[in-house]
Amino acid sequence: MKVERRAVLEALARIVGAGHVLTDPRLIAGALVEPRGLYQGKALALVRPGSTVEVAEVLKLCNDAGIGVTPQGGNTGLVGGQTPDETGDEVILSTQRLRAIREIDPHADVMICEAGVTLAEAQAAALEADRLFPLSLAAEGTCTIGGNAATNAGGLTVIAYGTMRELITGVEAVLADGRIVNALSKLRKDNTGYDVKGLFVGSEGTLGVVTAASLRLFPNPRARATAFVALKSPQRALDLLSIARERLGAGVTTFELIARFAYDITLRHGLARAPLAGDHAWYVLIEASSQIAAGFEDAFSGALEAAFDEGVIEDAAIAASLDQRHEFWKLRDSIPEAQIHEGGSIKHDVSVAVGDVPAFLAEATKAVEAFEPGARVCPFGHLGDGNIHFNVSQPEGGGQAAFLARWDAMNQVVHGIVARMGGSFSAEHGVGRLKRDLLARTKDPGTLSVMRQIKAALDPNRVMNPGKVL
Ligand code: FAD
């Protein structure tokens, strides 16, 4: 086995150069563990191909030798999809060196980025061309376009622009046997058969490696307004969403619901400043934008005034400066960190139909509090998409390990409610390793069988990201 391993490593080095086949555990330690420390793997090597052709040669070699390949971008995924298993037999294929922005086409409003370009770099390149690439999420400084495509990332602007699936017009990908699929189209209209590019979006590295993607660009908004709003209940938040849409149309780009507990802990741990005085049960961070600057601020404040007059909201602060806007966002972004200071937290990344969110929150809160007396629910997230991060912090003064040991059991309680409402147990973060068994148990059998057939057709030796998703 040792000789075989050495032969494989030498062959990999001939493809990508010896400097890009890393085996020293100290150099690859960061790539072996996922961000929350849920999985700790080992690897034969971390390989960094510098081109699509090199990716193809690496995959062909691994496929012929029966070696599992774990694709990895920014390593920010939250379900263990980018972490190799514990055997030490798999290769991590890192996209770190696929960093070119190949083209920005302002007429087609399309930008072609290689897989290893970070989301923040893609956003900045679009801005330089006076365009907007709207995907936005807290990990944007580190996560990559390849990872965003592979996880069908969503984030903070889905309500206006959709998930990665709607933001992609084409992909270039390499299959397990080294075949290159060039579906890097800029076309919005192309009805010539199956949506092959779409197969790779959300495939989490199990069907091939995405090496580049064509991304849709949008006009760069000329005006933007942000407000922090206090209200009584999630139902009132939905009412506010209706009023805002009625008055601002598709310009509502963010609508984040925040529970009182989530708000309070960011202040308690000094991570944010209070945007509003007084005590309120729920909050919303709302942002809207427009191509027409004249009159936009009035329209935005008019929507909030109307909501106030109708008794929908209790209080609101509109950001008067960029700094204040950042303050509002800081509160929203620091909720996960604040939860760490509160001890253990059990997560549920779920979605239900938007109108069902209030009923889901009420039912899930009651069920969780009955299941674990003293547990503190900490829901927050993308109400406009029906996607709530239904996190639960451990009881005050309780043991963290004992609480976290009930992770699966609590998940079952919450996911049972989600299933009854026709929702999803993974709205954003995918399946990876964390939710693989749940997928097998709960997905519609017909859909699951199609997924398995696609996997068998494109990766018959099961070398692409083994043990993930299916
Ligand atoms: P990785 O973590 O490296 O990989 C993720 C998965 O994609 C793995 O299965 C991996 O094998 C596969 N993969 C990576 N690159 C490729 C490729 N080129 N070809 C094929 N497969 C590949 N997600 C949301 O949708 N919305 C959010 O709001 C959001 N917020 C987040 C906030 C934080 C703080 C963090 C840490 C994560 C968040 N995420 C969110 C999770 C999100 O999925 C990832 O941040 C991101 O999309 C993954 O990109 P990555 O480059 O880090 O991929």
Image (tube, rainbow, N blue to C red):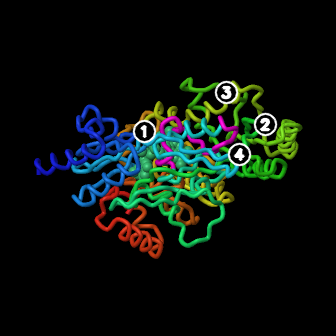
Instruction: Verify whether residue 22 appears in magenta.
Output: no
Magenta stretch: give its range.
128-148
Residue at which label 1 appears: 344
> Does residue 376 appear anywhere in the picture?
no
Residue at 84% from the left image edge and 36% from the top image edge:
297
Dominant secondary structure of the magenta stretch?
Answer: loop
Tell me the mark number nearer the camera, choosing from 2 and 4: 2
**Badge 1 amino acid:** Gly
Above or below residue 93? Residue 334 is above
Q: Earlier in the sequence, mark 2 or mark 3?
A: 2
Question: Does residue 280 appear left or right of residue 213 in this picture?
Answer: right
Residue in view at x 46 percent, y 42 percent: 116
Between 108 and 374, the one lying in front of the other is: 108
Mark 3 / mark 4, whichever is N-terminal: 4
Q: CA distance from mark 3 to mark 1?
A: 24 Å
Question: Going 38% across and 38% down the picture, which residue do you hit?
Answer: 400
Horizontal arrangement in the rendering, residue 467 relative to residue 273 (left or right):
left
Vertical position of residue 398 compared to residue 383: above or below: above
Choose top left, top right, bottom left or bottom right for residue 294.
Answer: top right
